[in-house]
């Protein structure tokens, strides 16, 4: 049943069970239902309706797990099939959603050629001037070539069309990313609480994580509030951060956290209303995800004009420490930011980038603290 999340959303718009039933794969979101032999030429899908529930355009290949390309064996993360998007190829699907609800899209992708690749994710209808996002597939963060990516959007209709497009212009048409497992998750708008001026400070609200994949989900770079799959937070700068869950990783608090996988090239930030002259405490946990990410790490936390460096010695086996940054607000709005000073690589010879984990971020005014 969960496979047909779109249908459940429609049913539950009237049955008030929305929050519990809005997670999951799109219909045929893992491409397990494929074309008939008559709709294919080799691995190439030649009928635009050849993949059930999807409409395709351009050079699309339907790939079975274990397929050989050159000397590379293609492995599919979920089930036995995936699709490959050639130059200018796209796949799209119409999905029933709740109008006015914020969603996060998650999908898994793998590069197959050495070139830098990117995917254009878009949703229509959408009244925003920029209703699409270009997600770079530039660096592999997982060990086997697959990573999961997320993107957020506001549903502006009861039925939307989700499109994934490869704008590539590679010489070899067989280059282009493989796609598997496309899922949606409805996100609850995070609220500030009396005990925390930050929204979603413990990162519990975030993109869909595939239960069967153990590499988390990347939250892409240059994400502003309106397209953030991590409500309340922005991703500044050039590289992604990774969203992780306690089912597959060590997480300092509750079920979700953020791993800073790209050193100084990626920062996570939130702007908070503050009162100039007032003193605030920013508290947070720094740890490791128990994913063979070992070594000396440093998380840099910024609030207003103050910076705190939090060193953390990781044995790659989980654990965390708490840190506190006290600062006096100098303006009406204070930007709270976190980044990792160093790049770290996993000790499993995979060459995958990894880094310190942050979680349980709280901002309180010191006067409130005393009264609490
Ligand atoms: C199948 O693909 C091959 C190679 O691209 C092409 O030569 C052939 O004409 C195609 N066959 C059909 C039936 O389209
Ligand atoms: C995901 O994992 C569960 C439990 O191991 C398994 O039963 C299920 O078949 C898996 N699903 C897919 C699509 O691989
Ligand atoms: C991404 O796709 C959208 C929707 O098709 C399109 O309007 C936009 O121009 C594309 N962006 C780029 C950079 O190609
Ligand atoms: C803070 O906001 C007030 C009223 O909105 C404005 O007058 C003042 O200039 C702002 N101060 C700063 C430092 O931004």
Image (spheres, rainbow, N blue to C red):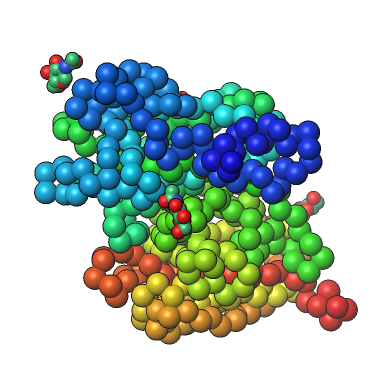
Residue 280 appears at what percent x and percent y? Answer: 73, 73
Foreground: 158 or 312? 158
Give the mark count: 0
Residue 304 appears at what percent x and percent y? Answer: 63, 66
Foreground: 80 or 223? 80
Q: Is residue 7 above or below residue 116?
A: above
Q: Is residue 53 left or right of residue 296?
A: right
Residue at the location (48% across, 69% down)?
A: 249
Residue at the location (29% across, 28% down)?
A: 60
Residue at the location (27% across, 31% down)?
A: 61
Residue at the location (33% across, 18% down)?
A: 47
Q: State the image quarter where residue 290 is shown.
A: bottom left
**Quadrant location of ligand 1?**
top left
Q: Is residue 109 above or below residue 320?
A: above
Q: Is residue 322 left or right of residue 51?
A: right
Q: Looking at this rendering, what residue extends furthest in the right direction?
A: 371
Report whether residue 194 is seen. Answer: yes
Report whether residue 336 is seen. Answer: no
**Quadrant the N terminus occupies:** top right
Q: State the image quarter where residue 92 is shown.
A: top left
Q: Is residue 369 above or below residue 221?
A: below
């Amino acid at each position: 049943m969960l496979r047909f999340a779109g249908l459940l959303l429609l049913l539950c718009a009237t049955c008030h069970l929305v929050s519990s039933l809005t997670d999951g794969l799109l219909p045929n979101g893992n491409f397990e239902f494929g074309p008939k032999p008559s709709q294919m030429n080799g691995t190439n899908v030649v009928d635009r309706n050849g993949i059930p529930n999807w409409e395709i355009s351009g050079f699309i290949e339907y790939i079975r797990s274990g397929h050989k390309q050159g000397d590379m064996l293609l492995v599919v993360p979920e089930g036995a099939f995936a699709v490959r998007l050639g130059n200018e190829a796209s796949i799209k699907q119409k999905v029933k959603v709740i109008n006015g609800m914020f969603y996060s899209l998650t999908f898994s992708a793998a590069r197959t050629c050495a070139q830098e690749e990117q995917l254009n994710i878009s949703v229509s209808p959408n009244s925003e001037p920029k209703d699409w996002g270009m997600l770079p597939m530039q660096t592999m963060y997982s060990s086997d070539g697959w990573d999961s990516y997320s993107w957020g959007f506001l549903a502006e209709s009861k039925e939307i069309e989700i499109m994934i497009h490869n704008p590539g212009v590679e010489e070899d048409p067989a280059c282009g990313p493989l796609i598997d497992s496309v899922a949606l998750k409805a996100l609850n708008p995070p609220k500030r609480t009396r005990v925390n001026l930050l929204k979603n400070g413990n990162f519990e609200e975030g993109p869909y994580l595939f239960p069967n994949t153990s590499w988390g989900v990347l939250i892409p770079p240059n994400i502003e509030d309106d397209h953030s799959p991590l409500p309340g937070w922005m991703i500044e700068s050039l590289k992604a951060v990774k969203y992780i869950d306690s089912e597959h990783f060590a997480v300092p608090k509750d079920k979700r956290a953020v791993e800073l996988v790209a050193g100084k090239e990626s920062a996570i930030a939130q702007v908070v209303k503050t009162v100039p002259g007032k003193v605030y405490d920013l508290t947070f946990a720094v740890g490791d995800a128990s994913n063979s990410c070992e070594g000396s790490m440093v998380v840099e936390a910024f609030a207003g004009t103050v910076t705190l460096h939090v060193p953390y010695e990781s044995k790659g086996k989980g654990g965390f420490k708490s840190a506190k940054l006290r600062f006096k607000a100098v303006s009406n709005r204070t930007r709270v930011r976190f980044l990792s000073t160093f790049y770290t690589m996993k000790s499993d010879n995979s060459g995958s980038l990894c880094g310190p984990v942050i979680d349980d971020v709280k901002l309180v005014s010191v006067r409130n603290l005393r009264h609490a």
